[in-house]
Image (cartoon, rainbow, N blue to C red):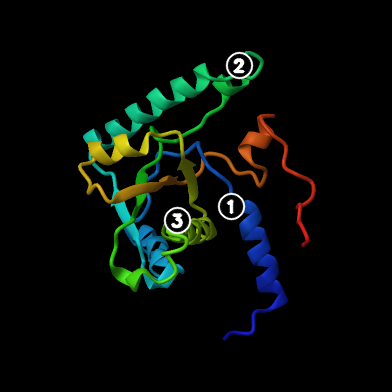
């Protein structure tokens, strides 16, 4: 195991601080070799029982992206309609996706019925397969950020509708829809915090038993 230096630990802390959800992207393309290097981090991600349940779908065609954009618009309109009167204007001002600008679209699915891993660890907590995909997305995100790329996680989507629209197997469940590209702006403060939607907690609540 490498002897990680104090400088490395400081850089890692800075990387995690700068790992922000990006929703505004430049139109510049992402070099394919760089994207593949970032994706390779997923292969090294932890997974319950070594099940490696992630399934990566890269949306390249105009019809595929149109499905995702239409899905987001429908769900975003429904979410806006459900906002309390005093929150609706704030919600309407938020930019909640970079779907139309990001040069790279990645949808990470969980193959819930995978036979890899022989069910180890998933009998009592089957959701750990989806958690494994979250870990994979996080590793991808950190590597991408280390190269200066921005990543935005779009969660305002109907997962089942997207799966059907992309004609994917029924056993696949959407975990993360990621927009990837060069960020149009740089900040280490969460966008929702800058927009006044929610302040970050000043302390970490830890319960003791």
- Tag 3 secondary structure: loop
Q: Horizontal and vertical percent for residue 97? A: 46, 34
Q: Are marks 3 and 2 in contact (CB under 8 Å)?
A: no
How far separated are the C-alphas under marks 1 and 2?
27 Å
Circle 3 is placed at which residue position? 127
Front: mark 1 or 2: 2
In terms of sequence position, does the residue under pointer 1 or pointer 2 come before the other?
1
Label 3, label 1: how far apart the Cα atoms are: 25 Å
Q: Dot 2 surroundings within 10 Å: few (below 14), some, or many (20 or more)?
A: few
Front tag of 3 and 2? 3
Q: CA distance from mark 3 to mark 2?
A: 35 Å
- For label 2, the SS is helix
Q: Position of residue 109 (x, y in %)?
A: 35, 51
Q: Which residue is mark 1?
A: 19
Q: Which mark is residue 89?
A: 2
Displayed quadrant of residue 162 = top left
Label whose residue precedes the other's in the sequence (3 or 1): 1
Closer-to-camera residue (21/36): 21
Q: Residue furthest left?
A: 167
Residue for point 66% across, 47% down = 188
Q: Residue at x 24, y 47 (%)?
A: 170
What secondary structure is found at the residue carrying circle 1?
A: loop
């Amino acid at each position: 195991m490498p002897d990680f230096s104090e400088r490395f630990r400081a850089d890692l802390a800075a990387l995690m601080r700068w790992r922000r959800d990006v929703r505004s992207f430049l139109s510049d393309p992402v070099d394919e070799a760089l994207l593949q290097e970032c994706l390779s981090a997923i292969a090294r991600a932890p997974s319950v029982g070594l099940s490696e349940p992630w399934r990566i779908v890269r949306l390249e065609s105009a019809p595929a992206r149109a499905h995702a954009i239409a899905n987001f618009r429908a769900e975003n309109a429904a979410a806006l309609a459900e906002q309390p009167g005093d929150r609706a204007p704030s919600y309407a001002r938020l930019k909640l996706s970079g779907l139309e600008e990001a040069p790279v679209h990645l949808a990470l699915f969980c193959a819930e019925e995978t036979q890899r891993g022989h069910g180890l660890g998933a009998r009592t907590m089957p959701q750990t397969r989806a958690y494994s995909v979250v870990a994979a997305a996080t590793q991808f995100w950190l590597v991408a950020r280390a190269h200066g790329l921005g990543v935005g996680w779009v969660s305002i989507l109907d997962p089942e509708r997207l799966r059907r629209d992309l004609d994917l197997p029924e056993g696949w469940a959407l975990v993360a829809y990621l927009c990837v590209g060069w960020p149009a702006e740089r900040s280490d403060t969460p966008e929702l915090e800058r927009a006044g939607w929610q302040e970050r907690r000043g302390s970490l609540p830890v319960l003791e038993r």
